[in-house]
Image (tube, rainbow, N blue to C red):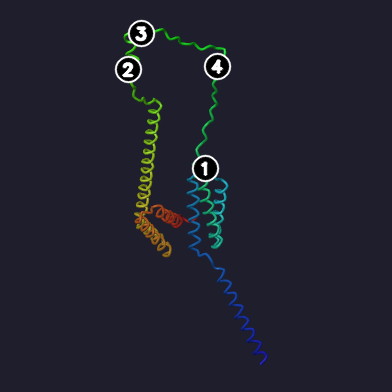
Amino acid sequence: MKKTYSLSIIISATVVIGFFIITLIGCGVSASLESAKNAVDDARIAVKSAKEANAESYSPKNMKAAERFLSEAEQALSSNRRQRAYVLANKAKNTAESAKAEAKGKSAIPEEAPILPEMRIQPQPSDVKQPTFVQPDVIIPKGIEQDIIKKPLPTTPNIVQQGDFQSLDMQNRIQAAAQALDAAQKAVESARLLLFKLQVDVELSKMDSNIKLLQDLNAPIEMINLIKTWYNQAQQTAMMGNYDASMKIIQRIQTYMQVLTSPIQ
């Protein structure tokens, strides 16, 4: 009886310890492999976008930190440390976006205008006498003198000074320049949207050929289905007119295609 009782206690303790270990292992699982890969891809896109905004010149400290986080995230992903790769990739993305914002802010500050030397008017010496005008004597006949006194002088219309014309002309020029600038900005924005639309249309037209290429290379079916899903998301986003978001999805597809189709070193 004592042996049976001791054996039952050992079995019960083993079950409890096993359940506790399984619970701890289950709680430790956090980031999946797909979420870690997506985070690393998003970090690569953010670092590339920051470089294109010249962040290496305007925000070198943040840029170096973003590249370091990205490199560590890629190493962690290759070692199947998914949680570490996910965290480092998010740090790289946030740091790269901060570097891009700082670069845009610094590049938009205009250069200060040079300070011209102050011009001073030299005072004239007080002992210099100004020439005086002496009005000559005018002789008026006696018969006309009374008529001139009685008749009022003719009134002259108001004369607009030359400075008023110059001020009005300057205001018209400024208004015309502002209207031209507004029209130019609208034209640039329209051209940018058209360029994004053309790029998205070209990349979406490659969907069938890219899927066939992956099938010919015997790529995993899960990866092929994932890329098909991304293509559908990019197409739906483009149909709603959000070409920026569609281009980000396409860039993710391009990154995966490059990895899947590149030869193994």
- Left or right of residue 232: residue 52: right
The numbered mark at residue 227 is none
Q: Distance between the residues labelled 4 and 1?
A: 49 Å
Tag 4 residue: 124
Pick the front one: 61 or 140? 140
Q: How far apart are marks 2 and 3 (CA)?
A: 15 Å
Pick the front one: 109 or 146? 146
Q: Name the kind of residue labelled 1 in the image.
A: Lys
Residue 79 is situated, as x and y percent measured from the top left of the image, at 55, 61
The nearer-to-camera label among 4 and 1 is 4
Tag 2 residue: 151
Q: Is residue 143 above or below residue 197?
A: above
Determine whether label 4 and label 1 are within 8 Å by CB.
no
Q: Which residue is drawn at 57% across and 51% down?
A: 65
Residue neighbourhood size for the residue with mark 1, other residues' Cα within 10 Å, grouped as few (<14), some (14–19), many (≥20): few
Tag 3 residue: 140
Q: Residue at x 51, y 61 (%)?
A: 36
Q: Name the kind of residue labelled 4 in the image.
A: Gln
